[in-house]
Amino acid sequence: MNPNPNSNPKPILVTSTEESTGKTAVALALALAGRENGRDVGFMKPKGTRLQSSVGKTLDEDPMLARELLDLDAEMHEMEPVVYSPTFVQEVVRGREDAESLRETVREAYEGLAADHDLMIVEGGGLTTGGIVDLTDADVADLLDARVLLVAPYGEPGDVDRVVDAADRIGDRLGGVLFNAVGDAAYDDLTTDVIPFLEGRGIRVFGALPRVQELAGITVAELAEEIGAEPLTSAGNGEFVERFVVGAMGASEALTQFRRTRDAVMVTGGDRADIQTAGLEAPGVRALVLTGGFRPPGTVLGRAEEVGKPVLLVQSDTATAIERIESVIRSGRARSRETVERMGELLRDYADVDAMLSLAGEVHEE
């Protein structure tokens, strides 16, 4: 490691106005950009919130991916000092965790990592998550003396409220905002009206990244693998899905609802042939997930092959399937080197990467 003894860089903390904004992909892409610029980059996520079971331990997938992409030697407990699981929250509520001790654990872990690097990227875990132990992202920024990059979506004027509210929460530590996954219909409004409005309020905007499909969702084939589903048809497994809808009503009502969605997977019981047929006729429904282990009638599968829509079968009940699908779709954006590298391309094309990296060298005014 070659830390620069002549500088005292601030960590850059990447947070977001809401979940599923591409925060992880942005943080990791920015870390890779820093490394390409000759910096020795470290990574930390103080609150582990994206959880999975690994060798009997609860680990967050984001630091694991960072360690792989950045060739880091740090231990997981250093990169992720607080595992923010439901069990942890229960322990806090019952008085079995001490907020000040947890803050000290985070500080010590950060200092240990920062000693080996000249640039630290810190991924936030939420503007409100951690409030019960004074470890919201704004709290962490204060604790680590960090500058903050706020990632935000933009699809409608009301999204500006969330950006302004987040800026108020973060305060003077806010370095600026990066808009991500902006659709074509909203792009002109954002660049013509919203960005000048925010900059007029003293909120710097680093760029606006367009929505690209490969970062906005996952393929049906990937979804099937993640949820352990059995494909019942051969077509359409390369289709991208970004959300889910539940078929739990009458067929006519279902068709009306399904027509208002786009790029969705429809989840319903395997015994609901009427709902399945409605989903196959809705242009915004890309795939069907049937629950309960019930195989649909041959007429449904025949129609699915005709219209090129995949049908997946799971053994679990609908509620369990929905929970798993929601988790997979929500976490699908930054699960591989390819998606992070694609985000890096977008940053280079549509944002001021050098300005974002320079936040590490800016002095925070108390």
Image (tube, rainbow, N blue to C red):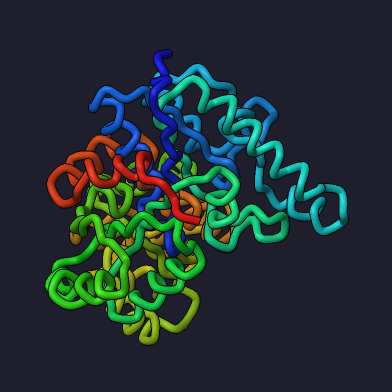
- Tell me if 34 is positioned left or right of 251 in this view: left
Image quadrant occupied by the N terminus: top left
Q: Is residue 362 above or below residue 250?
A: above
Give x and y (percent) for residue 195.
22, 70
- Identified at 36% across, 45% down, the residue is 362
Give x and y (percent) for residue 245.
41, 69
Give x and y (percent) for residue 288.
37, 60
Q: Nearer the viewer, residue 283 or 312?
A: 283
- Identified at 62% across, 31% down, the residue is 109
- Identified at 42% across, 43% down, the residue is 12
- Identified at 53% across, 40% down, the residue is 45
- Can residue 89 be seen by looking at this rendering? yes
Q: Quadrant of residue 341?
A: top left
Q: Is residue 354 above or below residue 275?
A: above
Give x and y (percent) for residue 250.
44, 83
Q: Nearer the viewer, residue 205 or 47?
A: 205
